[in-house]
Image (cartoon, rainbow, N blue to C red):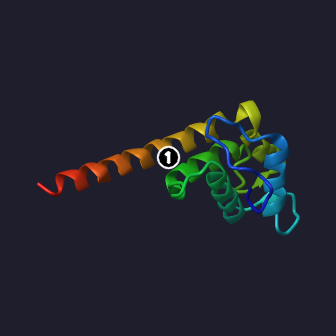
Amino acid sequence: MFGHGIAQKSTNEPLTEKEVRSLFDRHDGNGTGTLERAEVLALFDDIRRIYGLEQPLPVSSSQVLFKAIDHEGQGTLNWNDVRQLAGSKSGMLKKTLQRARAKKQHLHHEKKKEETWGDW
């Protein structure tokens, strides 16, 4: 379990609304009910760890996620924005994490291939 009480998950398991709320509250450090960009990036980083990804999400992926859930375009996210990361509405998050995991596996495979062929 992580410091926020959420066990590691596979990318096929959605976060529950309760888990997302716990993460939201943890990152709403000033208690305003909204998350600034830096707080959202920290939240995404926690989610990445929950799903067992070692490498941070690429900045471009984080920006795409942020813009997709920032409906008002204000540069901050409120609870109603962030709750989209839970349950059946978490499709975009899951796809982003799965792409990141696939890229990691591809890079690992390529590195192994280079190590194998490097002896020739």
Q: In which quarter of the image is the N terminus?
A: bottom right
Toward which corner of the image does residue 40 lie, by quadrant?
A: bottom right
Q: Residue at x 85, y 45 (%)?
A: 18
Tell me residue 113's x, y (percent): 26, 48
Q: Measuring 82% from the left and 68% from the top, which residue is drawn there?
A: 29
Mark 1: which amino acid? Ala
**Percent coordinates x, y for residue 63 in the rendering:** 57, 52
Depth check, front residue: 35 or 91: 91
- Residue at the left extreme? 120
Q: Residues within 10 Å of mark 1 (few under 14, many from 20)?
A: many
65 or 27, nearer to the observer: 27
**Which residue is depicted at the point 74% across and 41% down?**
15
The answer to which of 22 and 82 lies nearer the viewer is 22
Tag 1's secondary structure? helix
Picture coordinates of residue 46, whole percent (x, y): 68, 57
88 in relation to 58, above or below: above
Residue located at (53% from left, 49% from top): 61
x and y percentages locating residue 22 in the rendered image? 83, 53
Mark 1 lies on residue: 100
Outermost residue on the top side: it is: 88
Q: Is residue 97 left or right of residue 69?
A: left
Residue 16 occupies which quadrant of the picture?
A: top right
Number of numbered tags placed on the structure image:
1
Screen quadrant of the C terminus: bottom left
